[in-house]
Amino acid sequence: MFSEVETTAQTASGDLTTPRDMDSISPGQYSLPISLSQSRDASCLAFMNESIAWQCASNTMLQLSILPPPGNSNSMYVKLSATTSNNGTFYYGHQAPDVQPIPLNPRNSVAPSEAETITHSFRTTYDRVVLLKEKDFTSWVHPVETRSVFQEGDTLWRCVFDQTTIDGYIYANRTAVSGRPTNATTTAQKLPKIPHMLKLVEQRMPSGKGPYCEKMKVKGDSLFAVSDTGKTMLNLADPAAEAGASDIGGRRSAKFRARQQPTGKFCRCQWTVQ
């Protein structure tokens, strides 16, 4: 398990090492079993009943594709997605991210105890989606996270956190053990598990764009908004930090903003595959 100090330092630092040791990670498609998150913090949201909108995926499977360097590039690329298309099926809870190919960067771990470990990392943002049952916001108790399926005609809440930051760290010199969640799909079972220890961190950074939920209805293989409801903005615990982020956004580049640490309360999930 890696310390919070290491996670924060790696997230804050943008310094990359000279590309090396890339051969220790082989291109290919790998299954990425996601168990219970090691940490979950929904403190960016002001009200307890609304904090259910920030869920952390559990007992599911993602697909990690490591792509060879294109052309004359020295950088491999990584893609993160669900193992299969949803085929018109909508699952309860945190939806799989859809991260299109981005560079996989080699860097040295900054923690003293990990000084010799080469960490390959990637970072991007995506619009984080959580699907909830219609009654979820009326309960003060979070339900047990399941992979239950919404049926035709069901009404649900679709909650969106725009520009959620996702960081991935691959510890090339640390071998992962075998094992997959019991509900792995047939497609996932055919993929080799990633052979290295990997850490994923999702975090909502103040961006000036507030998260929201909208009531939707399942019709066929699509979700349709319930027209008389509209979007319901979620209440943030630290509006001042949001205002500050919005002000920075007018003067600084998106790349710079992505490297900023949250200045107030924030929402976060962390998973380790090992």
Image (tube, rainbow, N blue to C red):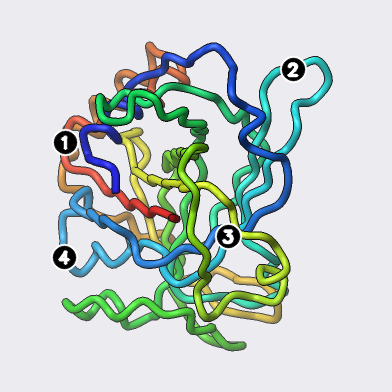
Rounded to the nearest whole Å, what is the CA distance between mark 3 and mark 4?
29 Å
Residue drawn at (63%, 27%), measured in percent from left and top?
22
* Residue that numbered label 4 is attached to: 48
* Residue that numbered label 1 is attached to: 264
Q: Nearer the viewer, mark 2 or mark 4?
A: 2
Q: Between disc 1 and disc 3, whose residue precedes?
A: 3
Q: Between disc 1 and disc 4, whose residue precedes?
A: 4
Q: Quadrant of the C terminus?
A: bottom left
The residue positioned farthest toward the right in the image shown: 71
Q: Which mark is residue 62?
A: 3
Q: Nearer the viewer, mark 3 or mark 4?
A: 3
Rounded to the nearest whole Å, what is the CA distance between mark 1 and mark 4?
17 Å
Disc 4 residue crowd, few under 14, some 14–19, many 20+, Cα 10 Å: some
- Give the number of marks: 4
Rounded to the nearest whole Å, what is the CA distance between mark 1 and mark 3?
31 Å
Q: The residue under label 3 is which amino acid type?
A: Leu
* Residue that numbered label 2 is attached to: 73
136 lies left or right of 159: left
